[in-house]
Amino acid sequence: MKRLFTSESVTEGHPDKLCDYISDSILDSFLQKDKNARVACETVAGKGEIFIAGEITSNAEVDIENVVRQAIKEIGYDNSELDIDYRTCKIRVSLSKQSPDIALGVDKSLETKQGENIESEGAGDQGLMFGFACDETEELMPLPISLAHKLSKRLTEVRKNNIINYLRPDGKVQVTVEYEDGEPLRVDTVVVSTQHNADVDLEILKKDIKERVIKAVVPEKLLDEKTRYFINPTGRFVIGGPLGDSGLTGRKIIVDTYGGYARHGGGAFSGKDATKVDRSAAYMARFIAKNIVANGYAKKCEIQFAYSIGVAKPVSIYVDTFRTNTIPEEEIVKKIENTFDLTPRGIINYLKLQEPIYRKTTNYGHFGKKDLPWEKIIKI
């Protein structure tokens, strides 16, 4: 049976990703000075204004306005008439400390309060997190989201390196892959919408994007005469970034994970320190799922953890290998329970999540990048 599946990615200049990057830049700035900082930082962007809100508890002093302007500058926004200007945009900051009621459960877990020998904070919130891996790509990610991320990253590369010198930072990509009997067969459709200068001829843009972006990324064997290309299908994309559409931290959670190919617990990542299991447990779930596949226990693996606020250990562990497992799923669950400390402190220590590594997670997916600790392969 043949089926089509589609995933999307966005460039770092997308207004929501701009907000994610600002939030993660603030998080990293605190972690550089205080590894125990508690950060839950949200960013809103719109029409020349950036608003920072949330809760931060730390001994560190950080010039937040300067961090924000540098983040916007790095992305390449410098024109208030087309998107936003890092030099002139208004920045408002409204931050408080973490709620003492939440800190009560995070600082000391319920198990510790009850006398159990568990050296861990409690989870920073209730919630459920998913991790996923499959053998469709070298990085053990689904092919549609893998290609979408590579295309959106390439859009940024050709812009910043002046390979295509008329592009602006905002952009979106969508890739549709045709599957046959569960195996990826070909790329059916590629959609690219990229912000550009006003004086660019649309036909030149279409040719440049197809030759210098799409064909530079998508393997030739996956493209054929039936592959469809939709490049700037509206005909014009000059106004972009927060001037074209408002941005908000945590609004691209499917882009951040598996492109809709696997389930999502609902929690966002950016701007949160690792005591927030929305982030840390999702990273750990990906790490374990990837290693289940890499160790040959399954061709495809999805893992769910669920936590209760203030409680260190997960309240449930779920594994689904979609009938691709080579050993019983119950045995896989036992391997997970016997091998890994899934308390917040156990995850933080194992993956070294108190380091300022989060700016490099923001764009082009939090999974599938070789230099991130939850992407390493071990023997289970």
Image: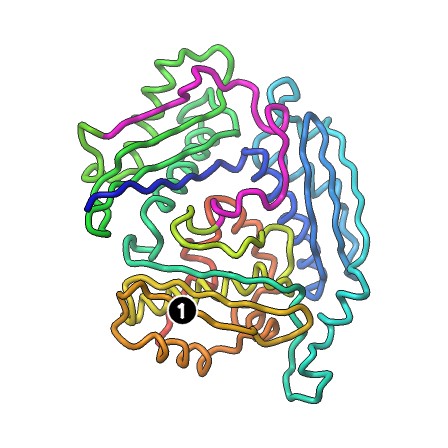
Residue at the spot 42% in from the left edge and 61% down from the top edge: 375
* 247 magenta-colored: yes
* Image position, residue 303 (x, y; %): 43, 65
From the viewer's side, name the closer residue of 320 and 171. Answer: 320
Q: Secondary structure at mark 1?
A: strand
Figure quadrant of residue 17: top right
Q: Is 124 above or below relative to 150?
A: below
Residue 2 horizontal side relative to residue 363, left or right: left
Residue 159 horizontal side relative to residue 35, left or right: left
- Pointer 1 local density, CA inside 10 Å: few below 14, some 14–19, many at least 20: some
Stretch of the chain drawn in magenta: 227-256
Q: Is 112 above or below relative to 46?
A: below
Quarter that holds the C terminus:
bottom left
Residue at the spot 35% in from the left edge and 64% down from the top edge: 301
Residue at the spot 47% in from the left edge and 23% down from the top edge: 167
Q: Amino acid at mark 1?
A: Val
Figure quadrant of residue 349: bottom right
Residue at the spot 76% in from the left edge and 54% down from the top edge: 55
* Image position, residue 155 (x, y; %): 42, 32
- Give the residue number, with chain letter if any, for mark 1: 319
Q: Is 232 above or below relative to 246?
A: above
* Image position, residue 239 (x, y; %): 57, 20
* Residue positioned most to the front: 1
